[in-house]
Image: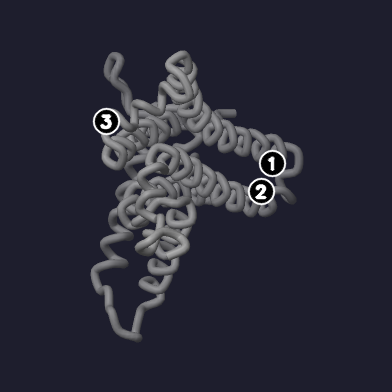
Amino acid sequence: MELSPDSTIFWQSGEVKLNATIALTWLNMLLLTLGAALVTRRLRDDERLSRWQNLLEVLVGGIERQIADMGLKPPREFLPFLGTLFIFVLFSNLLAIVPGYRPPTGSLSTTAALAISVFIAVPWWGIRRRGLRGFFGLYIKPSVFMLPFNILGELSRTLALAVRLFGNIMSGSMIAGILLSVAPLFFPVAMQLLGLITGVIQAYIFAILAAVYIAAAVKVQQVREDAEPLPEGGIHG
């Protein structure tokens, strides 16, 4: 039983190969791009909104509120990155209900690429908000002796982010394969529903963890922006 799409090779020339992970990733990107173009080509700002625009506004608004709840403000600055992560992982996982489709998130190479994107985004936003010295100063707090441990923690959480998503998707495929081989007439529908729920949860967890890591890198600057200025004369006026 092939659990990872990496094992399916469509084309190979020497060390260069095109496997199902790459093909399905690009297919998902193409479908998402076409879907976004179709949904946004006739956007309206009046009361007569199409059902697709309503769905889009609910999705984008929900993601934006979640980002704001994590303390990342203004949320629209982080919406393109975190929203894309969530929608890509969600879309990849939900398509698993299509017969013969194996989500690219079931490949460690895909989840590692997504985790590396988060790994790069954290210092990028951290340096933008806190400055170069302020961000890298986090690695020597509370003392300079914590530098190697903080670096190790940064690397280990990136690895954990990749392995968590990969392990959950792969284990779900394994359990589904075992149950389908035992009772192929009863379990298919139940496993499809369970796969949908698991896919949504894993996409949400991945995006939330990415937001948490970014929020930790920008939190000092964010506190300063959110703090209300005191009236003249101090608290007692």
Q: Tag 2: Cα neighbours inside 10 Å, few (<14), some, or many (≥20)? A: some
Q: Judging from the image, what secondary structure is the residue with disc 1 in?
A: helix
Q: Percent position (x, y) of residue 190?
A: 69, 52
Q: In the image as oriented, which residue stretches furthest toward the bottom?
A: 47
Q: Percent position (x, y) of residue 222?
A: 38, 48
Residue at coordinates 28% horizontally, 14% vertically from top-left?
A: 14
Residue at coordinates 40% horizontally, 45% vertically from top-left?
A: 85
Image quadrant assignment for residue 164:
top right
Name the front one of labels 1 and 2.
2
Q: CA distance from mark 3 to mark 2?
A: 48 Å
Against 148, residue 198 (above or below) is below
The residue labelled by disc 2 is 191
Taking the image as shown, residue 52 lies to the left or right of residue 207, namely left
**Of 204 and 88, the residue lying toward us:** 204
Q: Amino acid at mark 3?
A: Leu
Q: Judging from the image, what secondary structure is the residue with disc 3 in?
A: helix
Q: Amino acid at mark 1?
A: Leu
The residue labelled by disc 1 is 180
Q: Amino acid at mark 2?
A: Met
Kindly tell me whether residue 7 is visible in this rendering: no
The residue labelled by disc 3 is 132
Q: Percent position (x, y) of residue 15?
A: 30, 15
Q: Quadrant of the N terminus?
A: top right
Taking the image as shown, residue 222 lies to the left or right of residue 128, namely right
